Image: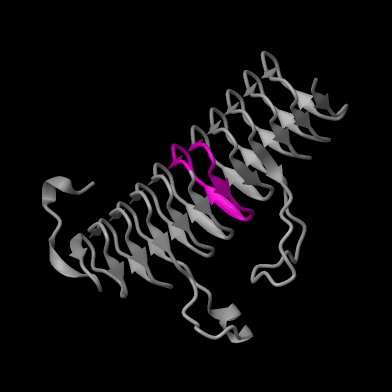
Amino acid sequence: MNFIHETAEIGENTTVGHFSVIEEGAKIGDNVRVGNRVTIHAGAIIGDGTTIDDGAVVGKQPKPAKTSTMQITKEIPPLELGKECTIGANTIVYRGAKVGESTLIADLATVREDVEIGSYVIIGRNVTVENFVTIGDRTKIQSNSYITAHSTLEDHVFIAPCVTTTNDNFMGRTEARFDKIKGAIVKRGARVGGASIILPGITIAEETFVAAGAIVTKDTEEKTVIKGFPAKFLKNVPEEELL
């Protein structure tokens, strides 16, 4: 048995599985497939041809703890999912996110509020994308990676599995750090190898290749390969491997 609020709008040829909830004001396009035990929260906008798999929660209102660094200081707009997106099983996409067309957010991933994701993006299984993040078109983030708050990933970026980005250089828990939180900036076409760590505020230049396991402690140069702890210049990226 499902609960569908009387003010929800459901398009033609859209199917809803068992035990799902669609709250007030949700707008679901044509040819959408909603799985079992899905929750679509109030006001969420779901584009045509989108698939939302079993157990997913979309448009959830965030509720930060009193001690959280990121507090809600404004009304958060409804979630917007573009056409032909895929939301994986048991994935959570919060209210205030905006997702372009044909984007995949795989099983068990979490996308927080105030996030903008482009089109044809892949966000892998169990990836976490924190708030105030921008992700460009055709970027891929592989399984178990962590994209910290206040990060920017431009178009055609590749993030391998288990990459960690960070945004806080302060050891002490002072309020002074709040104004200096800054995540990574990963420029167009850059590639970051598996299990690498990017320190706060670092810019990965266009078409940089970060070797697996590197710890990136300073900004990189365009079209270079870096590796090590800390990461250092190894060579230029071969011309045939550039975008």
Where are the magenta residues, as a range?
A: 104-125
Verify whether residue 202 appears in magenta.
no
Residue 133: x percent and y percent? 53, 58
Q: Residue at x 12, y 45 (%)?
A: 240
Seen in the image, is 240 located left or right of residue 79? left
Q: Magenta includes 120?
A: yes
Q: Is residue 10 above or below residue 163?
A: above
Residue beneath the point at 38% across and 49% down: 155
Side of 241 relative to 100 (left or right): left
Q: Is residue 209 left or right of residue 31?
A: left
- Quarter of the image with the N terminus in it: top right
- For this rendering, which residue is in front, 173 or 132? 173
- Image coordinates of residue 107 in percent, x first then y, are 52, 37
Which corner quadrant of the image does residue 213 belong to?
bottom left
Q: Quadrant of residue 225?
A: bottom left
The image position of residue 96, as x and y in percent, is 67, 50
Number of marks in the rendered image: 0
Q: Residue furthest top?
A: 13
Asked whether, in this view, residue 239 is left or right of residue 15, the answer is: left
x 62%, y 28%: residue? 54
Residue 211: name its quadrant. bottom left
Horizontal and vertical percent position of residue 29: 67, 25
Q: How is the image coloured?
A: one colour
Give the residue displayed 77% in from the left and 30% down from the top: 21
